[in-house]
Image (cartoon, helix red, strand yellow):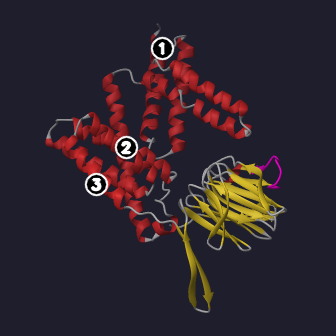
Amino acid sequence: MPDQEIKSYKILDWIIISLFVIFILSLSNSIFVNQVGYFGALLFILIKAFLTRKNPFSKTGLELAFALYMLAEILALIFSDYKAEAFHNFTKRAMLIPIVYTTITVTSNIKTGKNFFILFLVGSLVTGIVYLIVSVQYYLNNQYLLTESGPALIQNPITTSEIISFTVLFLFAFIMNEKTSWKTKLLLYSGFTISVLTLIATYKRTGWMGVAVGIVLILLIKRQWKILLPIFIAGLILFLMDKNISQVSVYNFEGKTAKKLYSFNTEGRAWSVAKDDSLFIINDYENGLLFYKDSVLVKRIATPEPATSFLKVNASLFIAQLIDTRFLVFERKNHEIHLINEILPPGDTKDFFLLDESLYTLDIDSGLTYYSSITKKIKPVRFPELIGFNKMFIDSSSFFFAGDRSGAAVYFREGNFPGELITKKKLMI
């Protein structure tokens, strides 16, 4: 092989390694940079394969599992009532599979694999330190109380929580397994402390629960009964002492005083309450929509997922938002309420706005979507350029948007759509 070709391939190898390092370091802090590193490394691997006429990928033994998984995704796409959203999810998940083969191709030996793993831990811990610094200011500004969440510094707090949970579990496993010098133990315990504090600062139970299950599993594998037994006893005591009460109270306000009329308990967990004439509609986490007349349950409507809000659109129309961001539309006919439509926004819905019988949904990852009617199956109008906002308001002349990282923006209202941009500013947090 000519020296020039060898030199060219070495340059390609250097580019692939550099991009993969970017992928590793950005796993815990930037989806965009992470995608640049991953897709960039994969692209140059394919370029090298084309030039050398050699297949760089090796079998992993997971090929059948991947094939069955993709078959399930294809069937879900075919039979889905929401083709566009299903296709979007299909492509996102399909593009994750090559990560396995890219990682194996770039990781030529055990030593290289260890170095990449250390890079991941270092990047994750640096991210954690920055997140903790921002979280202190976030706490001092009382924003935990306002948002019931950690700061969205680099990405959604849930995503941050789930990613940092892996770091917590890796470091915990090393603490349990490694018999090393006191310097290494100090580094492990320091890293574990930083990652745990970061996990707590995200204020998201998904990461907390994942770590709890993971730690118990590690302790079971290591047969650490002396640690597991106190944890089990403490958990049992907490379970027996914990008395969750789901209660709705009704007050009558007279001047500056509030008089409690009555209260009643629900079987599940009351999420929110709405009023319709003489009825109270409770969004119950376990039991769907509960209709009460005074304190008597008169009707129950089961929902496929817990409802987080229930709103009266007009005298005969109602709309409920589910926890998975779906919207259910109900109509009252002959004193009975029936489900007439279901709306699935394209992304992670953070806010919505009702205008007569039309609906606007604001997805932080998909932008604004407009449905001209909530009662019919119609094709919505999308504004993907409004990605990154999580709050909105619409009046007779303007559209207002706000987001932690996108700042605030105001647009002229042109009919039912946002028109020309009036102003856009970054928020000072």
Name the secondary structure under disc 2. helix
Look at 62% across and 84% down and name the residue there.
Answer: 252
Q: Indicate which label's residue lies in the foreground, 2 or 3.
A: 3
Residue 134, x across and y down, in percent: 42, 61
250 above or below 45? below
Quadrant in the picture for residue 181? top left
Q: Tell me the kind of residue under disc 3.
A: Ala
Residue annotated with mark 3: 234
**Side of 121 relative to 256 (left or right):** left
Circle 1 is placed at which residue position? 4
- Residue holding disc 2: 213
Q: Quadrant of residue 22?
A: top left
| Residue at the outermost left position | 182
**Which amino acid type is marked by label 1?**
Gln
Which secondary structure type mostly characterizes the magenta part of the structure?
A: loop
Q: What element carries label 1?
A: helix
Q: Position of residue 373 (x, y in %)?
A: 82, 55
Earlier sequence position, callout 1 versus callout 3: 1
Q: Which label lies toward us, 1 or 2?
A: 2
